[in-house]
Amino acid sequence: MNANDWFAVSLSFRVAIVATLVFLPFCVLAGVWLGRTRRAARGLVQGVLMTPLVLPPVVAGLLLMRLFQWTGLPIAFTWIGAVFAAGVVAAPLWIRTVRASVESIDPRLSIAAESLGASRWRRFRTITLPLSWKGVVGGGVLFAARALGEFGAVMVVAGNTPGRTQTIPMAIYSKLQSPEPGAIWPLTLVSLMIALVAILVGEWLARGTAGRRRVQPA
């Protein structure tokens, strides 16, 4: 691996970590709201939030570029642009995981706390968050792994400049055109290890959530 490869690895982790921190409040609050609300608008809001899951990443990137142009934000073709592109594409995974975790909590706990005078914030802080933390963490791991591996949207928004905006997927794509047949394998192995760790952590946390669902009182 050369200097550009190591830069791609470090930039990918930087993008994933910053995107996780930036999108944490939104994804958690959106997941909690979807898991608790019974309002008629729930289906529409959920459909809008899940759109990046089925939208081609290149299209998502083009829409973000249009948004940046409309708002005048000078973050296109920068690593900050990569943060938002990767985060938008990965956010539905985190939201769905948090929503499922919140839905597994016995609603009678919140009802009992409300009857005793607990505010909505206190119920969230003392009941919802402690009982759904595995979903929050597991969703965050999946989010970070997805953000780290995003290609299409990041390519459109941030470009593919070695040593500046090139992440692991774009470095692998560039190496496909290299005359050295083995040039792609170091970065490919890094990607495989990251994916394996994310899957193992996600499965472990999912088992914990399922176990809690089974032991809820009747």
Image (cartoon, rainbow, N blue to C red):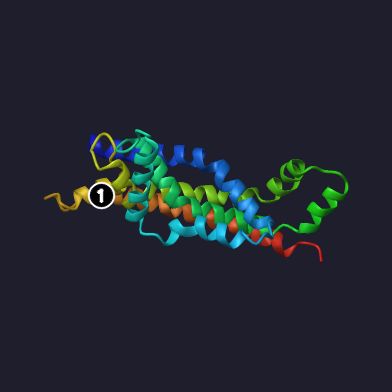
Q: Which residue sits at x=15%, y=51%?
A: 177
Give the residue furthest to the right: 116
Q: Secondary structure at mark 1?
A: helix
Quadrant in which the C terminus appears? bottom right
Point 40% across, 39% down: residue: 15
Residue 106 visible from this viewpoint:
yes
Going by the numbered disc 1, the residue's amino acid type is Ile
Does 106 sit left or right of 34 as displayed? right
Vertical side of 187 occupied by 207: above or below = below
Q: In this view, which residue lies farthest toward the front? A: 70
Quadrant in the picture for the N terminus:
top left
| x 44%, y 46%: residue | 87
Who's the residue at 76% across and 59% down the image?
106
Residue 39, relative to residue 172: is it above or below?
A: below
Could you tell whether 3 is left or right of 94 in the image? left
Question: Residue 149: x percent and y percent?
Answer: 37, 50
Q: Which residue is mark 1?
A: 172
Q: Position of residue 29 (x, y in %)?
A: 61, 46
Residue 204, image x, y percentages: 57, 56
Question: Which of these two is toward me, 44 or 138?
Answer: 44
10 Å neighbourhood of mark 1: few (<14), some, or many (≥20)? many
> Does residue 180 lie above or below 9 as drawn?
below
Q: Nearer the viewer, residue 69 or 57?
A: 69
Q: Is residue 183 visible?
A: no
